[in-house]
Image: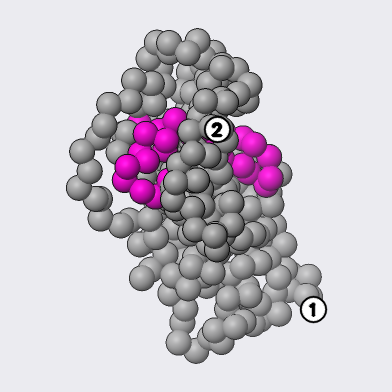
Amino acid sequence: MSLEDIGNEPSASVVPEECRTCAAEPDAPDRHGATHEPPSFCYALGRVDFRIPDLGVDRELAQSIGRSRRASLTDREAVSEVLGRRENRYLVRRLCYVLTVQGVDTYLLRPRDPADFRLLARAVRANPRATDLDVVVGLRGGIAPPELCNGLMLPVVHFDQLFSFDTDELVLAIEKPDDMSEHEFAAAAERLLQRIMQMADNAGTSDEHRALNYLAVRYSAIYIKTFEKSLEDSLLTAIDVRPSHIEGGRRVMDVVFSFTDRRTDVIDKWFVRVDVRDEFPFILTKLSPYYDH
């Protein structure tokens, strides 16, 4: 499996069930009274969790857990098991799903296709870990009204793609050169991913953040280069994202990685050019040496 294969599982044969509110286009009239804003593309990295919207859903979920719960299960494991059962799809549709970025509640998630509620249910992990990661690609709409999710007023992202994994899976999916140590390569890759994840205020809606988040989970060359430079005693010291001077009617970002030699302080820069005009970013120019203009 390669980095590009993560999240590209074959679609299950699922007949979408009617959902009166979740699949509406972001710019369509909202019967919940959400604040309307022009939709913008979103490519966000974070963690998906659930919230209970009202007391009735809370009691119904508790009863479903009580009917099926085994003594050995924790509360979290019991919820995950209930949501994974076909007969409980009505409960999956009624819960709220929140994407947290760096521990902060950032978006409420709604699928554009009702069949994709199964992806949200799968993202509610039985045993969540600090290394869990969810990637959400879609359209950011307006602010949810308070009655939608028990007073939680966040921007709503209507997603087209949601894939879940942990950072160990991401590192294993990177195509490691044969002459590189497995342990050292994994450590370098994890450091780079954490650096990207910790960049301030990355909610995944600006062109800069969408380009960077896309590269973090889809482009293994930046991890390989980081490891190669570490063998040369150079550290990754900066990641800069800037509009490209070559756009040709598109919206193109240059993502520049700066490596500093620890002995000489000489900086070596490499960049990759990403087209972010459409919902799904893509590589325009592969990783290459960068020269300041």
Q: Which residue is mark 2?
A: 58
Residue at coordinates 24% horizontally, 50% vertically from top-left? 12
- Label 1: state its secondary structure: loop
Query: Does the segment drawn in magenta span residue 101?
Result: yes
- Does residue 264 sit above or below 164 in this rendering? below
Which sits in the foreground, 233 or 55? 55
Residue 38 visible to an observer of this rendering: yes
> Which residue is pictured at 57% across the width and 78% down the height?
185
Q: Quadrant of the N terminus?
A: bottom left
Location of residue 62 with respect to 266 vertically, above or below = above
Question: Start and end of the magenta stretch?
Answer: 83-112
Q: Residue at x 56, y 43 (%)?
A: 49
Mark 2, other Cα within 10 Å: few <14 / some 14–19 / many ≥20: some
Q: Amino acid at mark 1?
A: Arg
Q: Position of residue 138 (x, y in %)?
A: 42, 35
Select label 2 or label 1 by which is in front: 2
Q: Is residue 198 above or below residue 138?
A: below
